[in-house]
Image: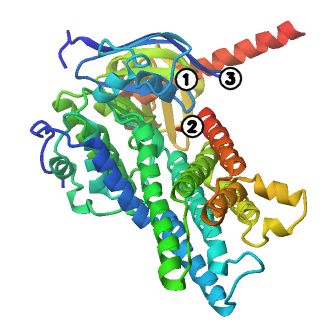
Amino acid sequence: MSVNAADVVTVQHLVKRYGPLLAVNDVSLSIREGEIFGIIGPNGAGKTTCVECISGLRAPDAGSLSVYGLSPQKDRNKIRGLVGVQLQQSALPPRLKVGEAVKLFASFYANPLDPDELLKSLGIKQIENSAFKSLSGGQKQRLSIALALVGDPKLAILDELTTGLDPEARHETWSLIERMRDRGVTVILVTHFMDEAENLCDRLALINHGTVRALDTPEAIAAQAGGSRVRFVPSQPVDEQTLRAIPGVNAIERKQKYVTVTGTGDLAPSVINALAANGVQVSDLEARTGNLEDAYLKLTRDDRAVEGDSAAIEGVVER
Amino acid sequence: MISSGFRELTRRQSGGRFAELLKVQAKLAVREPYGLLAGIGLPAVLLAVFGFIGQAVPGKVGDSGQTIIDLWTPTLLVIAFLFIATSLPNTLVRDRQIGWLRRVSTTPLSPAMLLAAQLIIDLVLAAAAVLIIIGGGALVFGASLHVQLLPFVVSLLLAIAELFALGLMLVALVPSQTVNQVVAGVVVFALMFLSGLWVNPAQVGDPLRTLMYYSPSGAAVRALLDAVFEGSVSYAALLTMAVYTVLFGFIAIRYFRWE
């Protein structure tokens, strides 16, 4: 991905309601040519609705969308030729065979990829005569990727591609997605696996309650978790005040023999020094800076805290 | 396991998209043979049943001047169409429920084409049913059909249109396969009764007779019987079928959902 790559998808102030439920509330983001763009967030956050609007499957209630300069609603026919979609929870007729499905989808596009080559490159050529209903989870996902790719799309939208896969199949799927990008395909990946987002995505949008809570590289979002975490086993019990007194320490957690201290700055040396001054030795030390999961939990927890506050305020107003 | 990258994959020109679709749908129709059984198996069985009854009870029925197999041929045709039409929701409701129709709607193929391919296959089945019932009735059981060609063909086509529109209306209205099994079962049974399979409408009193005459299946049977034996056209029956076709078709289009 080059830094100055052009934006191929632009979403501005997207709003989508289902009856009284506000699924997407003022989402704006842009996706650059050739990147793997991740959309993360809790279940029901509005991730799927966002990508369904981008692919033209749903019409937004407000806001504007542009995909390769086209409107997903007005130019839906043109968009369908450019965008390959892998839908969450979408099955094939149970008796349709793998090879037939890929050839059938190839026939829908003006210039498809060669179905045989694609099957080989996805490692599913040997099951081309298997019916959909007899496939394993991993095989179904590969077929789903094949169907999303066979039209040689410029943009692939993959919604919860690895949900329900075993670790090995997940890692294989990741390598497929990277190879998709190598081919120049821009990828939108909806996921709720932090390791997947961290490993694969060039940039991420964290969506919660229908709004974008963070939009940056995985590293930059992880940094928002703030500072670091140190876990250790003290040689003798340490009292809370000694730990609290260490500069930068925000929280202390004890579990069995382990003490975990989280806070800002370079915590490990200050913890070791402060405890040594009190005659306490430290063993089994493990220090790490905040990762994406920490940031994710922090950002989504912040939202919950805000909700709690506003609920309390509403309660007061009602009385 | 994974042999090569995607970068070197070649593109090629796409073949005829509808031909490929029709081929795949036909293969699926053979592998999931609800329609096939309804269109070919059922008429053959019914024909055999009524054929053997006709042989066991030879001679004319009452003062109609017709044999049993003559009289029941139109009913058998209508019931075969009814079974084919009500097999439509079996596949289409399932395909909608599992997200297949939606999946296809993200490609350049219009999902209406999927529907069209399915209808073409079911029309072929309806044609096969006509051949089996008329051909088999005449060759095996000696049914004598002195057909008035034009009214007969018009009645046949209207009966197919009306019952297929009914099938599509079921596809549009039933939310799931489970509901479809119940609803389609009731509809099939009611329309088999109203067609006169078990009770001849000429022998029952009003209001049942009127109900039967102006039901979708009863009107179809009446139009065919008139075209075959009276050599006349039953405009009331034809008009009834036309009204049902428009009504069912309108509801099907109005409430059709791809997801």
x%, y% of residue A122? 22, 49
Crowding near the residue tagged with mark 1, few <14, some 14–19, many ≥20 C-alpha atoms within 10 Å: some
Badge 1: chain ID: A
Would you say residue A246 is visible in this rendering?
Answer: no
Q: Distance between the residues labelled 3 and 2?
A: 18 Å
Crowding near the residue tagged with mark 2, few <14, some 14–19, many ≥20 C-alpha atoms within 10 Å: some
- Labels 3, 1: one chain: yes
State which mark lies toward you, 3 or 2.
Answer: 2
In terms of sequence position, does the residue under pointer 3 or pointer 1 come before the other? 3
Q: How far apart are marks 1 and 2 (CA)?
A: 36 Å
Of residues A272 and B124, the one nearer the viewer is B124
Badge 3: chain ID: A
Of residues A189 and B158, the one nearer the viewer is B158
Residue type at mark 1: give it. Answer: Thr
Crowding near the residue tagged with mark 3, few <14, some 14–19, many ≥20 C-alpha atoms within 10 Å: few
Q: Report the side of B15 relative to B179 (left or right).
A: left
Residue type at mark 2: give it. Answer: Arg
Q: Which residue is drawn at 28% across and 49% down?
A: B20
Residue bearing mark 1: A300
Q: Which residue is drawn at 59% across and 25% down?
A: A240
Would you say residue B199 is visible in this rendering?
Answer: yes
Figure quadrant of residue B246: top right
Q: Height in image: A239 above or below A124?
A: above
Element type at marker 3?
loop
Residue type at mark 3: give it. Answer: Gly
x%, y% of residue A72? 40, 19
Q: Report the side of B2 relative to A78 (left or right).
A: left
Residue bearing mark 3: A19
Q: Height in image: B121 above or below B258?
A: below
* Disc on res. B257: 2
* Disc on res. B216: none
Element type at marker 2?
loop
